């Protein structure tokens, strides 16, 4: 599903759904927190296939969806067991692609620990690098990998996070757990150059621009809610003689 197909599907869904609060058909945010005007799309020279769990689809800040809207030639595919998913299998069977999955583990190639030359040698320059990314919690991601037999044999890549996640509006298992968007951004940072993407252009920082602004907006909503629910009591000042 490309962005245009996604937007058409969302429009049809919104027209048939009961109206509670008007949501943007693209980012699925209420109009007052829509981030579409902040999006500046770019081509990372890598095709990212974002496999989004149904629970993530319903989340207020779904960073997989946000990434999809920011990147050209990306895919957003909803599901849990992708073994028989027609679109996923079509991508996997495309002989012009080299498919890998971003997933940590003992069998994963750690990009951080490799030199730029070694990273480049991981990928076939005659094929389009296609990186599958699971968008879900650690628990759902593990389950999706177990269920999706067509993903289990894919070569795996991972990295060591260089700094704590900025996803401060959702509790993470630990500080090194990146959101889907942050993981995609850092992957581009590490392998983009080898695929013809000019990392020094910092075009991929557009991902973080949208993400950080959305995090700050949600934090401001949380602060306002806390202030409304816990107003400070007026205390008469005391004076000492």
Image (spheres, rainbow, N blue to C red):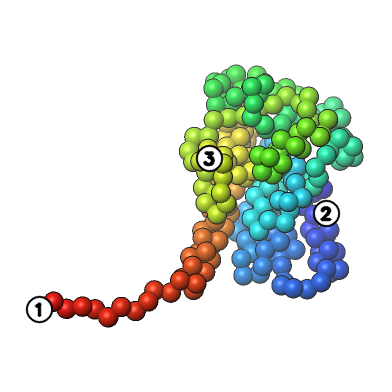
Looking at the image, is 223 positioned above or below residue 196? Answer: below
How packed is label 3: few (under 14 Cα within 10 Å), some, or many (20 or more)? few
Q: Residue at x 66, y 39 (%)?
A: 138
Task: Please state the horizontal and vertical placement of residue 56, each as a whole percent of the image.
Answer: 71, 51
Lateral position of residue 81 relative to residue 139, left or right: right
Asked if residue 236 can be seen in this view, the reply is yes
Number of callouts: 3
Give the secondary structure at mark 3. Answer: loop
Measured in 3D between alpha carbons, the distance from the residue under mark 2 to the one under mark 1, in whole angstroms, is: 75 Å
Which residue is tagged 3?
Answer: 174
Q: In the rendered structure, which disc, 2 or 1, sits on the residue that comes first in sequence?
A: 2
Measured in 3D between alpha carbons, the distance from the residue under mark 3 to the one under mark 2, in whole angstroms, is: 36 Å
Q: Nearer the viewer, mark 3 or mark 1?
A: 1
Which residue is tagged 2?
Answer: 5
On-image quarter of the C terminus: bottom left
How packed is label 2: few (under 14 Cα within 10 Å), some, or many (20 or more)? few
Give the secondary structure at mark 1. Answer: loop
């Amino acid at each position: 599903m490309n962005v245009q197909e996604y937007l058409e599907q969302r429009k049809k869904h919104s027209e048939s759904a009961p109206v509670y609060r008007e949501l943007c058909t693209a980012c699925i945010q209420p109009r007052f927190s829509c981030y579409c005007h902040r999006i500046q799309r770019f081509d990372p020279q890598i095709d990212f296939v974002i496999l989004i769990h149904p629970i993530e689809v319903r989340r207020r800040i779904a960073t997989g969806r946000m990434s999809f809207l920011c990147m050209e030639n990306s895919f957003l595919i909803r599901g849990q067991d992708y073994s028989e998913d027609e679109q996923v299998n079509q991508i996997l069977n495309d002989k012009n692609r080299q498919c890998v999955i971003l997933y940590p583990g003992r069998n994963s190639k750690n990009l951080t620990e490799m030199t730029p030359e070694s990273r480049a040698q991981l990928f076939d320059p005659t094929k389009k690098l296609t990186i599958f990314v699971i968008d879900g919690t650690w628990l759902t991601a593990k389950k999706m990998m177990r269920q999706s037999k067509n993903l289990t044999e894919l070569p795996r890549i991972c990295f060591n996070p260089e700094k704590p996640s900025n996803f401060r509006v959702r509790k993470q298992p630990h500080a090194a757990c990146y959101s889907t968007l942050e993981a995609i951004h850092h992957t581009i940072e590490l392998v983009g150059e080898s695929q013809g993407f000019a990392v020094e252009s910092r075009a991929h920082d557009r991902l973080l621009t949208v993400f950080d602004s959305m995090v700050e907006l949600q934090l401001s909503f949380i602060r306002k809610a806390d202030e409304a629910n816990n107003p400070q009591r007026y205390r008469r000042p005391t004076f000492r003689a």
